[in-house]
Image: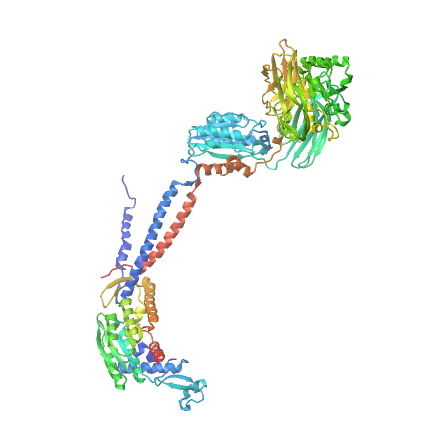
Amino acid sequence: MDISLINAGLAAGVTLAALPFILHLFMKQTPKHIIFPALRLIRERQKRSRKKIKIKNWLLLLARMALLALMALALARPRLWSNTSLGDREVPTALGLVFDTSLSMDYEQSGKTRLAEAKDSAYEILKKTPESSQVFVVDSAEPGIPPPLSPAAARKRIEALSTRPMFRPLNDAVGQAYTAVSESERDRHEVYVLTDLARSAWDTNRAVDGLDKLKKVKNGVATYVLRFAPKDVTDIAVSEAEPSSAVATQGESIVIRAKVRAQGPAVSRVVEFKLDGVSKGKEAVNIPANGEVEVKFTTPKLDPKVPLHQGLIKLSGAPDPLPFDDTRFFSFKVQPARKVLVITDRADDAEYITDALDPDPDTLPVGASRSFQVKRLLAKSLTASDRDTFKDYTCIFINNTQSLKEDDWGKLNAYIHEGGGLIIGLGNRCEAENYNSSLVAQVVPGKLEKKTHIPNGTRFGKVHDFTHPLFARYAREIEPELARLPVLAYWKVTPAQETRTLMSYADGAPALIERTLKGAKTGRVLLWTTPLSTRPDLESSEAWQEFPKNWTFLAVMLETVPYLAGGTAERLNYTAGENVILAIDPTRRFKNYVIQQEDSKTPETLTPPVTNDSLVIVSPQPLGQWKVTAVGANGEKESMGFSVNPPLSESQFVPLETAQLDALFGKDNYQLADDPKGISEVVKVTRLGRELFPWIMALILIIVTLENLLANKFHREAGSRVAAGATT
Amino acid sequence: MATTAEKFLKPEVIRQVARLDLRAKFIVEGFISGLHASPFQGFSVEFSEHRKYTPGDNIADIDWNVYAKTDRYYIKKFQAETNLTGYLVMDLSGSMGYTYRQELTKFEYSISLAAALGYLMIHQQDPVGVIAFDQKVRQSLSPKSKRTQLANILSLLASLKPSGETAIPKSLHQVAGMMRHRSLVMLFSDLLGDMEPIRQALYRLRFSGHDVIIFHILDEAEALFPFEGMVELEDNETRETLLVDADGIKADYLEEVESFRAGYRKECRNARIDYVPLHTGMPFDKALMSYLLSRQARG
């Protein structure tokens, strides 16, 4: 490399660099020589200062060493609480994305639903995720361990997510993600839970699933809860819309009772009632702030030719940020009132049964339909024509009746074998001989041993099978309530073969025995070992218990008749996620059942059930009206249907408390963020740890300043002590 | 304004007086004059102190001069009946011959002061002697109170020359051995040696029952360090040299001097020795006052 000079003459000026040195030589002072006897004092001072100087030099040395060390440390960018040993973004990650797809995520704010915002955030996370990562997308509505996806595939999967009614808590969904992520061998493990943190979506009584699996992951699994909670929630919802009876009686009207609830300020809305797609009424309502109003609509007289009606209650009037709860669906059947015969010796023994099944219309709410028609007969006045018309009744009660003639029992036997239902209530009037006779024993489910009076009384005890149709509807409530009821006397009965005890007393004696008799049709006999009536005077020896006065009596009676009629009390209105059970005619055999939700274009076909008494549809999720068409071998059809509504809890937005979150995930086991900035921050802090760079730089500045101060001070002192220490 | 007599208390003035006997006389007269002019009254060569007149006192003892000034009756209290033997102990080390400004050397300052004290003591009829030492005791004059003793003292003092190294502790032990009766030892030295052995020697004097006044005399330059710029300092006893930045070291040096004096001050206080730090630029009255106070305490 050649170097040339444009003004070579000026280069001579380089020699001027020597000027300071020359000046230094010329101006160098010759020190003045002074006799000074007190020189020893200066020496003393020096001697004592030497130790101090040593310490100060050490301090300086340490400060300078610390400076170098801190500078090196700063360049290495240390961090605290990092989840991975590698800090950069390009770490292959096992990424779990748990989407809360409950209906509350449909809440719209600033033109976007919560789910849409959650999706946007997920896309941002995926953008920063290396391609070599494994992404596990968990839809809270779908069980099962999700498959690993590439970030691109995960994006498509996320696009397809939509809200669905919540029928299992997010605890399970998080568990799915933990399981999948913890099994991945990627270097970094993260699970993001994207949710509005509505309490209805979580089971706060237990921690999220899979926490135990996290311990097996070497570097741990970072959990980020990204909250997309709406601010200042306002929602108007139809919280209830029920027909007054699931089964309406032909030719009568039925009342539809609806409740409209406001979360937020007071509003006005129009409530519309539609039946079978036709508007049947509208009503403007003013709903108070955070309040509720009730609206009632009455159907026209129901046409006997239409066996099933489906309707809805809908809100209109203004847009609502949460649309799913603006409509509520219902279905009900129409059929003739079921006939029930009650045979007793005394008229008052039939009263409680009659009041339960066919009460005085004046005591019922307006519009309530008459589901049962009860006929009461005294045993002594049974006529031949009565016996011949047993088959017209859905079921027959014989309560506290002394005895029946053999002919009567014979007719009843035939009636049962043709699918009839018989309920026997044993009381103080019953004669064991009559009930234990060989003919009657074919019908009655047990042998009457003796009347048993309990001095201090016993109680109804154990319900042996809660899934039995008699008890299934009130499975949780009925046993404790029955266990509270005192029983002063009962018939000790030895159950016959091929019977089953449905309920016992607290002392273990059978209280209710069932016998099934197979004939042309299946018939059933229920034997209560205590009467289905009582006496006003509890001191009376005829008053055996107060069961008929309790609500459980009404509940059991209302379930008894449909059960004996060949099916359970049919439910047609379900909450999303529940299994739908539809009663089907066991005497008819259909080829298949076609099920279709009103908005769906693809019907589903089910084969007939083996038992052929009920059709179970597992957890239908789309909300609305469902049609079920039974198709026979010859093309004949029979229509059924049901309605699916969202869980009420989902329309009542209550956010999770921090303490509840702590209980779910474990305190300090998760990071919570609300907005994109917060998300980036918590992810950065958890992923990279807390950067110490600024702190180290501040420390360096402090030490530089300190070192300068020390150096200046020390050098001044040292310089003053001996500028050029020359001794001879 | 200083009187003619008082100006002789200043070293730069007394330096111009060549004869030691005159120096002593002028210093003492200047001191006495200063005492009378100041409100701090009570000392004279003839009497030891004043006290208030009380009925029954001899009227002839009333000091009319004091009455004229204060309008109050004071009577003269005459000197103690017992005499105190004094020794003027002179350090002959080479460092004592040092002066930076070519005025009074530390030694000249010392003998001027010693002469004045001798003058005072003889006039108070106290026996006074002289001991001079360097590595050991070189000269000594037995204490006497005769008027002729003053001439002997002055003569001896005038003949002393500081030179060479010194061994203060050893010499002081020797001095202690020489004194048989309880005496007042007045040491004139720059004490430039190791403190600990000197301290022990001083304690030895005190344990022997002697009272000690140390006139710690430094040169004005040693006390004030007036140098500037780079200077090469040489110890005139050991011939060691040290090149220093005078401006930079000044504060440290003064601190060291103060620490040096403070060390002696503390040790002297513990040993109940009167310690009088002086330098050659200071007037003599401070030293004389210290003597008188000490004398009074023992009178």
Pick the residue in front: A682 or A441.
Answer: A441
Residue beneath the point at 59% across and 17% down: A602
Query: In terms of image quadrants, where is residue A688?
Result: top left
Q: From the top left corner, tell me how far across and down residue B299 is, in percent.
A: 35, 81
- State the image quarter where residue A485 is shown: top right
Task: Give the total of numbered labels.
Answer: 0
Task: Judge by depth and name the residue closer to the eye, A209 or B1.
Answer: A209
The quadrant holding residue B238 is bottom left
Q: Tell me residue A404's x, y (percent).
A: 73, 16
In this picture, is A455 found above or below A16?
A: above
Residue B167: x and y in percent read 23, 70
Q: How is the image coloured?
A: rainbow
Q: Is residue B25 visible?
A: no
On screen, residue A591 above or below B180: above
Given residues A395 and A406, the one toward you in this image is A406
- Residue A443 is left or right of residue B186, and the answer is right
**Looking at the picture, how far across and down is residue A102, in whole percent?**
57, 29
Can I make out residue A491 in this image? Answer: yes
Position of A266 with respect to B282 (left or right) is: right
Image quarter in which the C terminus of chain A is found: bottom left
Quarter of the figure with the N terminus of chain A: top left
Seen from the viewer's position, the closer of residues B183 and A145 is: B183
